[in-house]
Amino acid sequence: MFVAGHRGLVGSAVVRRLAREGCEVITATRAEADLRDQRATRLWMEAHRPDAIVLAAAKVGGILANDTYPADFLYDNLMIEANVIEAAHRCDVEKLLFLGSSCIYPKHADQPIMESALLTGPLEPTNEWYAVAKIAGIKLCQAYRRQHGRDFISAMPTNLFGPGDNFDLQSSHVLPALIRKAHEAKLTEANKITVWGTGSPRREFLFVDDCADACVHLLQHYSDAEHVNVGSGEDISILHLTQLVCEVVGFKGEIVKDISKPDGTPRKLMSAEKLRATGWAPSMPLRKGVEETYRWYLEHGAAAQAPSAAASV
Ligand code: GFB
């Protein structure tokens, strides 16, 4: 099993989860195979010929990073998925799981969002670049299934968090950013922390080890063209999330809103029905997941603050 993006948030969780499966896990650092490079990807795949692939390598980031670097988010993700999926076909890989994100759906999709809502409306502008790349990845898997009979499947996780997260305040997602902000405010005895936007958008969160478990479950039990939502089925407002993080961290100061920062899509709660129907459900409650993530952050200190070197979804 090749885990592409093994040092990122999802990739590292998949490696942890696969340790329980007793299968041989192979990985590649960017120096060994820059997956944006078609020739390097083909040479590496021909040399290692994995029987299965979890494609968790991606250029990822929060709302500000996506809005600031559209070319990087579109180009890097298109190149990674096209190179790995084509090389997987050339090397007769039996199973490939492609990972996207809930941002593939229209900004104002009916909630909870069903898989069938894909391409039924305009995307959220702040991350449409990443979203278009990930939609292309879904279509690539469907095309190789249809033309070459490849068992390539796609999963669309919701907002993920957990051990191995990126805590860099400019490039991270909201949950690790709030953990770091609350922690640093507590340490410095500051009297407030700043939340981006109005705090009213709602987000669904899934602990990354639950996501990894769902990935292994799908590899074992799912073989169809349509992508599958991977979520907790519950959402929370950013303001309430901030209050929860402050309670876990032990910061009792004021929450100040920076409305110069974008809110992004107002809500993106996905339907969990399709995945539940295959017999899978998450096990980590949000508060406990935040407590585990904070513990990981404290144990890994400065290393946790650098943007994750190898990208992952
Ligand atoms: O997690 P986040 O960056 O990404 O932002 P999205 C979620 C919400 O949290 C937005 C607010 O409304 C942000 O304005 N927020 C509040 C913050 N404080 C902060 C903060 O300190 N940092 C961050 N980052 N947000 C991403 C997509 O959208 O979702 C990615 O851009 C990916 O491509 C990911 O799809 C799953 O949830 O808005």
Image: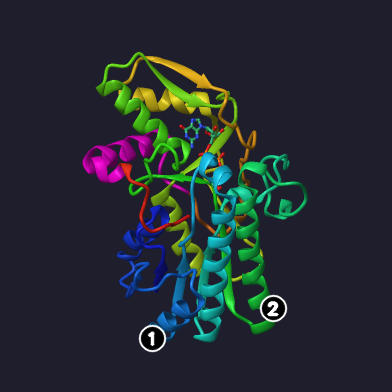
Is the residue 202 above or below the residue 77 in the image? above
Kindly state the secondary structure of the residue where label 2 is placed. Answer: helix
Query: Magenta segment range?
Result: 282-304
Is the residue 218 above or below the residue 263 in the image? below
- The N terminus sits in image quarter: bottom left
Query: In this view of the protein, which residue sits in the foreground, 270 or 129?
Result: 129
Q: Tell me if mark 2 has few (under 14), some (14-19) or many (20+) residues whose alpha carbon lies within 10 angstroms of its own.
A: few
Query: In this view of the protein, which residue sits in the foreground, 260 or 159?
Result: 260
Q: Amino acid at mark 1?
A: Ala
Question: Is residue 292 shown in magenta?
Answer: yes
Q: Main secondary structure of the magenta part?
A: helix
Location of residue 275 (image quadrant): bottom right
Q: Residue 66's spot in the image, x, y percent?
A: 55, 46
Question: Is residue 1 shown in magenta?
Answer: no
Residue at which label 1 appears: 47
Residue at point 59% right, 50% down?
Answer: 70
In the rendered structure, find residue 39 and report the number of the disc placed on it. Answer: none
Residue at point 24% right, 40% down?
Answer: 301
In the rendered view, does 48 fall on the left or right side of 174? left
Q: Residue 75's spot in the image, x, y percent?
A: 57, 61
Marks counted in the figure total 2
Location of residue 150 (image quadrant): bottom right
Residue at point 40% right, 80% down?
Answer: 44
Residue at which label 2 appears: 146
Task: Compute the Cα span from label 2 to label 1.
Answer: 27 Å
Q: Residue 172's spot in the image, x, y percent?
A: 44, 42
Location of residue 49 (image quadrant): bottom left
Residue 291 appears in the rendering = yes
